[in-house]
Every structure is written in structure tokens, then in C-alpha cells.
Amino acid sequence: QKEVEQDPGPLSVPEGAIVSLNCTYSNSAFQYFMWYRQYSRKGPELLMYTYSSGNKEDGRFTAQVDKSSKYISLFIRDSQPSDSATYLCAMRGVLAAGNKLTFGGGTRVLVKP
Amino acid sequence: DAGVTQSPTHLIKTRGQQVTLRCSPKSGHDTVSWYQQALGQGPQFIFQYYEEEERQRGNFPDRFSGHQFPNYSSELNVNALLLGDSALYLCASSLFDRTQNTIYFGEGSWLTVV
């Protein structure tokens, strides 16, 4: 079993819809949670970063972390065709454990005009 | 402010050959990590360098080696290439300082082994 599970999609939504993405994980040592966006044949771009449980909002993006359920989510409001990309969740342990990130497999999102 | 830069962008190698990939971290960053991303999968951690030493290593064979230079730039070397080494190789840049967490990625180097 992988440490981080992510539905590969593809997830197809109409423009303006809310995109809901999620990851589950098994390692209770994970403390920091990130979402990256990756366009085709490009490097991952950091979207959101959260520490421990709770919500964080940045513009159209909202990240949620539920450590008790080992479940994280990313919501994209008012989705645009430019949001079409692969979304990767990533997580890591405490800083003393180093900078190693463990990624999910990524979810492909397609926002149709 | 330059971000993470990687070279070359694309390259094709023959099975059994050796390859060297290069990375310059974001200005002000002192830690470089390397990841391998196979097509349709998430990145997998190879190793991390700080103060010119390998600090962490993922589940990759010894054919994968690296180096960090005094200016914090880094190289990833892969020997005896296998077809399965074909992937996007990503360099990640960060600060080792325990108060910093943000990790930035370069655009990657696409390696095709034929």
C-alpha cells in the first residue's frame, strides 16, 4: 500500500464549477501538507501549504487537513480552463526529519469552457 | 530573482550509458533534492544534499549518485542506464533552516533511455 493515495482521475468539470480534490495517507508522522499544480511537461508549482489540521484559503483555493482521518482536500472555486492540469498532493514529517516530500500519484483535472 | 534552473531540458541516452543532470537552486536556498517522476505518476524522492553532503536518500540503487558544490548547485549522475530510468528528473530547492518549509521545483530534465 502506498503511503499517499490520490485518485488519478481524470476529473472533468464545466467552467465555473467547484473542483474537489483529495488525498488519503497512512503515515501519522506527516505534519506538513502541500498541493502542487503541474502543467503538462512542466515542473510542479506550489499552490498551497498547510501545517497540521485546519483550513487555509488563498483566493479561489481552499486547502483542508483532517489529521484524525488522515485526509486532505483542495477545493478550487470558479474553475477556469487555465486550471486544467495535474494536481499533486505532497506531505512531509517534522522539520528535523528532513525535507523529503512524499507525493500522491496526481489527479488530472480538465475544466471545459 | 531566478528560480530553480535545470539543464539539460531534454536528452536521449542509450541503455548502459551514463548521464549527468544539473541544477541551480533558487537564490538564497542552500538545500537541493532530486526527484524522479515517471509518466503518469507522482515524483519519487531520490536524495537530498546540504552542505555538500547527502543528508537523506530514497529507495534508489547506488547507480544514482549526486554532488553539491560550494555555490549550492548540484548534479545528479545515473550510471548503467536502464530503460526504466526514462522519466522526468526534478530538482527541488529549499532552505535547511528549520523555520522554512517552502520547497520549489525546477522545470525538470526529460531523460529518455533507448
Image (spheres, rainbow, N blue to C red):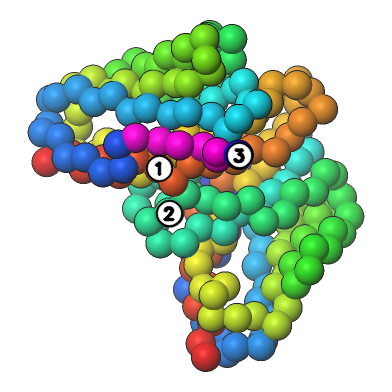
Horizontal side of A43 relative to B11 (left or right) equals right
Horizontal side of B100 relative to A17 (left or right) equals right
* Gap between marks 1 and 2 measured at Cα: 7 Å
Which residue sits at x=65%, y=26%? B28
Sequence-first disc among 3 and 1: 3
Magenta stretch contains residue A89:
no
Q: Amino acid at mark 1?
A: Gly
Q: Are marks 3 and 1 in contact (CB under 8 Å)?
A: no
Residue B108's mark? 1
Residue B30 at what x, y percent from top left? 62, 21
Secondary structure category for the residue under label 2: loop
On what subunit does the disc labeled 3 rest?
B
On what subunit does the disc labeled 2 rest?
A
* Gap between marks 3 and 1 measured at Cα: 19 Å
Question: Mark 3 vs mark 2: same chain?
Answer: no
Q: Are marks 1 and 2 in contact (CB under 8 Å)?
A: yes
